[in-house]
């Protein structure tokens, strides 16, 4: 690692050891993807990826004391070959083991979030959410009862929650066959319930009480809302800046890798606010 002042987004020694075996094994199979032939340390490349994920800056605006975007393009290769998701899943299993849970969950919570997209996003990948009257894209996620990500999808905001729900249930069934129950909100209709039944998953609609007013945390479902809030600590997710939905999915996985390494090393996630003097 080069001698420089660390950024808050940098991996600690303990966090780097959690993902180093995967990165080292991958690098051994791909000695010079970026063409720099080992000029930059892989830990520094990961630090640059996490810096961009955390701050939301454009890639070409990376600080000069981090590797340049031409050397950091591993993030695109890791997106396409599944390495980012592999690292994420390995860390998730470790967090679940730390909480004395089985590697795969038996229950998930599903929800979607409409987010505005930048002008960089092609028009055919965005749309208007008719319910929220908001343009952009929708993020659909499924989490376990610890708030850990099991499945994610990014589509145009005009896509109905039913399609998002069925896609997420398919992804959950493939990633965690042990799942038997799923909690959803009232935006997901009977189509999702029936689809879940076909997969052996009992889908339960968790709605607000009759007299509920304002924000009310709902049983089971509050975990997925918490995950959305935690992801928003990464400024790259406040708006969807990605041209490709696949890159938006990868951004979510990269952000969760940051969250999981901090949970495993018991390191607080810094907020956007400056620390008190």
Image: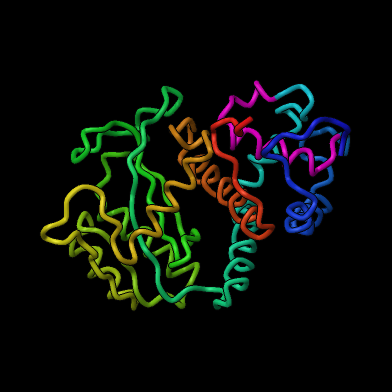
Residue 130 picture quarter = top left
- Image quadrant for the N terminus? top right
Furthest-front residue in this view: 277
In x, y percent, where is residue 124? 35, 32
Q: Residue at x 52, y 34 (%)?
A: 236
Image quarter (top left, top right, bottom left or bottom right) of the C terminus: top right
Please report the residue visible at 73 percent of the width from the left and 45 percent of the height from the top.
11
User: In this orientation, which residue lies closer to the viewer: 183 or 222?
Assistant: 222
Residue 256's place in the image compared with 150, above or below, is above
Q: Viewer-proximal residue, 53 or 163?
A: 53
Q: Estimate the x, y position of residue 159 in percent, counting from the top left.
A: 27, 44
Residue 56 among those drawn in magenta: yes
Q: Main secondary structure of the magenta part?
A: helix
Return the residue found at the far left: 210
Instruction: Indicate yes or no whether the magenta region holds residue 130.
Output: no
**Residue at (55% x, 38% y) in the render:** 271
Q: Which residues are magenta?
A: 40-62
Left of 258 or right of it: where is 178?
A: left
Provide residue 144's location: percent of width, then percent of height.
Answer: 45, 66
Viewer-side residue, 149 vs 32: 149
């Amino acid at each position: 690692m080069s001698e420089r002042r660390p950024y808050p987004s940098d991996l600690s020694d303990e966090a780097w050891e959690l993902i180093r075996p995967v990165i080292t094994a991958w690098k051994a199979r791909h000695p010079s993807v970026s063409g720099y032939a080992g000029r930059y340390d892989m830990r520094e490349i990961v630090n640059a990826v996490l810096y961009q994920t955390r701050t939301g800056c454009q890639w070409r605006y990376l600080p000069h004391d981090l590797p340049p975007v031409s050397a950091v393009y591993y993030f695109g290769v890791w997106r396409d070959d599944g390495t980012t998701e592999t690292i994420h899943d390995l860390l998730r299993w470790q967090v679940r083991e730390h909480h004395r849970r089985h590697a795969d969950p038996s229950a998930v919570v599903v929800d979607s979030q409409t987010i505005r997209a930048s002008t960089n996003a092609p028009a055919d990948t965005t749309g208007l959410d008719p319910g929220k009257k908001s343009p952009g894209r929708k993020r659909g996620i499924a989490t376990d009862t610890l708030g850990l990500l099991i499945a994610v999808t990014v589509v145009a905001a005009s896509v109905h929650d039913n399609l998002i729900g069925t896609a997420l249930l398919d992804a959950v069934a493939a990633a965690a066959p042990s799942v038997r129950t799923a909690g959803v909100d009232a935006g997901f209709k009977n189509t999702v319930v029936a689809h879940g039944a076909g997969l052996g998953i009992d889908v339960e609609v968790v709605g607000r009480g009759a007299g509920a007013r304002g924000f009310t945390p709902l049983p089971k479902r509050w975990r997925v809302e918490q995950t959305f809030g935690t992801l928003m600590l990464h400024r790259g997710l406040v708006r969807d800046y990605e041209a490709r939905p696949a890159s938006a999915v990868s951004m979510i996985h990269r952000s969760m890798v940051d969250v999981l390494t901090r949970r495993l090393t018991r390191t607080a996630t810094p907020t956007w606010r400056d620390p008190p003097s």
